[in-house]
Image (tube, grey):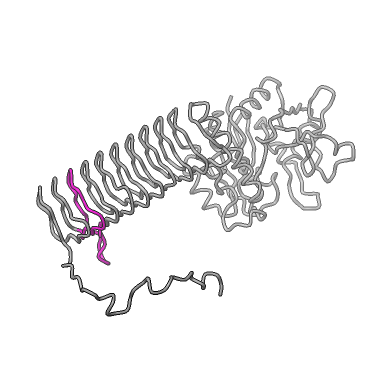
């Protein structure tokens, strides 16, 4: 059966209080409109038309060129929105799925069930409904004795008995396409808001003698996003499903309430994610890793058996059996080979670091090519920026760099050389050499006595300024 889709994405979303389109707001790693598009692709709705209006350029940029767009210049209700897609629907048979673009929790499984129910029951339309604990504000479905939809009544128009109905309209529909076109041509705006309402088409189909069914879905799947609170709620639900999927695939997540994983992330089995971990974008993490606590990884690759704790990794590649952190920052375009140690308060930027090299603490490695088995002493800095240009530092295999050393790029440290602690290196260091670049030490005898600087002469007092004195 031919399946096409009409997605309503023109609304301004005033309650979102944003400068951007509501449907491009992100939840669980992607704009909410893309969650809808993905669900539609899952049921074979290759032909999709999106009704755009407010900030349409943002919606178009997110969805790309594989879908069709129709402009709703004036927002005159949901029925009016779907009317704009009529030229796209003309001449089609089969069914048309109509749904809002702010329903990121709807799944392909539910849409497929609605299509199957629609086809087997020979309905003119099927409404996706849900059972709400608190149905206030929703349209209610009134069924006949055979279970077919008799009418949809809006909350403000419902009688007291109808308000007790808990089955609500999700605003997701499956229509027989020619019947939808016919019904759209007959709805009117004779209401207080002077708008054309899509649910009015259901009443028209029923009066025409067509059956309308309802498929009950999980209430969470029908949640829309109207404000920041609802955006947070659906994001949490999506994240919970993502975490559950990874746990079923063998990932140990200690606390899914504080672990956030984008839908695009891949994680190997037996990896442990500790609380406070956030993994985003196009990230792949290997098997038997230990990530966290309080770690963020964006668009990166992490090899098997690597540990990352209290650190940030962005657009980088980390090999197998590495140790990162605590409090390290691996910046974009950095590549760490296997068995590398990047310890406390170390930053790596746009650098390649070879196997078994280590910088255990308080080091900056920027624009550097680092070989194998290199040791960075505490406080080592590659000085890669002269105020105008960035320059590269080349450190070859088996180099030992003593603590508190400055490497003034461009400079090359050749194989098996040593850098004495406290040196500032401005020239290349030959292989097997020891480089010492310090100022000459001068000791001035009895200087403390002559200058009356004996610290034991009086006790050091607390800094009273910090106490507000």
Q: How many marks?
A: 0
130 with respect to 404 (left or right): right
Q: Quadrant of the C terminus?
A: bottom right
Residue 203: image x %, image y %? 79, 36
Query: Residue, x 46% and y 37% (percent of image)?
Result: 265
Residue 58: image x %, image y %? 52, 52
Is-magenta flag for residue 400? Answer: yes
Q: Quadrant of the N terminus?
A: top right
Residue 239: image x %, image y %? 56, 38
**Residue furthest to the front:** 457
**Residue furthest to the right:** 160
Query: Residue, x 47% and y 71% (percent of image)?
Result: 461
- Determine which quarter of the picture holds residue 88: top right
Is-magenta flag for residue 196? Answer: no
Magenta span: helix, strand or loop, mainly?
loop
341 with respect to 469 (left or right): left
Q: Identify which residue, 233 or 372, lies in the foreground.
A: 372
413 with respect to 384 (left or right): left
- Determine which quarter of the picture holds residue 424: bottom left
Q: Identify which residue, 54 or 187, lies in the foreground.
A: 54
Q: Report the span colored magenta.
A: 382-409
130 with respect to 323 (left or right): right
Q: Identify which residue, 191 or 261, lies in the foreground.
A: 261
Q: Identify which residue, 76 or 143, lies in the foreground.
A: 143
Residue 435: image x %, image y %? 13, 56
Q: Is residue 258 above or below residue 41?
A: below
């Amino acid at each position: 059966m031919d399946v096409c889709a009409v997605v309503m994405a023109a609304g301004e979303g005033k309650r979102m209080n944003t400068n951007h389109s509501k449907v491009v707001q992100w939840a669980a790693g992607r704009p909410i409109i893309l969650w809808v598009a993905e669900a539609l692709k899952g049921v074979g709705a290759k032909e999709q038309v999106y009704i755009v209006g407010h900030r349409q350029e943002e919606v178009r940029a997110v969805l790309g060129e594989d879908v069709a767009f129709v402009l709703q210049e004036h927002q005159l209700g949901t029925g009016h929105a779907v009317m704009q897609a009529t030229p796209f629907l003309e001449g089609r048979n089969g069914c048309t799925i109509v749904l809002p673009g702010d329903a990121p929790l709807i799944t392909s499984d539910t849409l497929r069930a609605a299509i199957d129910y629609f086809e087997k029951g020979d309905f003119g339309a099927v409404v996706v409904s849900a059972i709400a604990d608190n149905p206030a504000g929703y349209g209610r479905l009134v069924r006949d004795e055979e279970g077919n939809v008799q009418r949809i009544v809006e909350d403000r128009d419902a009688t007291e008995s109808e308000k007790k109905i808990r089955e609500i309209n999700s605003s997701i529909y499956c229509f027989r396409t020619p019947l939808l076109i016919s019904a759209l041509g007959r709805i009117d705006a004779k209401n207080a808001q002077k708008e054309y309402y899509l649910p009015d088409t259901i009443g028209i189909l029923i009066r025409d003698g067509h059956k309308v069914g309802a498929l009950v879905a999980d209430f969470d799947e029908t949640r829309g996003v109207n404000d920041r609170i609802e955006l947070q709620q659906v994001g949490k639900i999506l994240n919970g499903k993502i975490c559950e999927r990874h746990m079923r695939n063998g990932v140990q997540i200690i606390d899914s309430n504080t672990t956030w994983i984008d839908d695009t992330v891949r994680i190997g089995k037996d990896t442990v994610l500790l609380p406070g971990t956030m993994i985003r974008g196009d990230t792949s993490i290997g098997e038997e890793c230990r990530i966290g606590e309080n770690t963020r990884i964006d668009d990166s690759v992490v090899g098997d058996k690597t540990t990352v704790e209290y650190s940030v990794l962005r657009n980088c590649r980390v090999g197998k059996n590495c140790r990162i952190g605590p409090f390290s920052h691996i910046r974009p375009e950095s590549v760490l080979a296997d068995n590398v140690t990047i310890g406390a308060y170390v930053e790596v930027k746009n650098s390649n670091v070879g196997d078994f090299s280590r910088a255990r603490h308080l080091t900056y490695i920027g624009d550097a090519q680092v070989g194998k088995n290199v040791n960075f002493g505490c406080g080592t800095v590659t000085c890669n920026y002269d105020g105008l240009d960035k320059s590269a530092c080349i450190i070859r295999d088996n180099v030992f760099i003593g603590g508190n050393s400055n490497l003034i790029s461009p400079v090359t440290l050749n194989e098996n050389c040593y850098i004495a602690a406290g040196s500032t290196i401005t020239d290349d260091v030959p292989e097997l050499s020891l480089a010492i670049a310090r100022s000459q030490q001068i000791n001035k005898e009895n200087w403390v006595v002559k200058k009356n600087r004996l610290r034991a002469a009086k006790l050091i007092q607390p800094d009273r300024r910090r106490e507000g004195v």
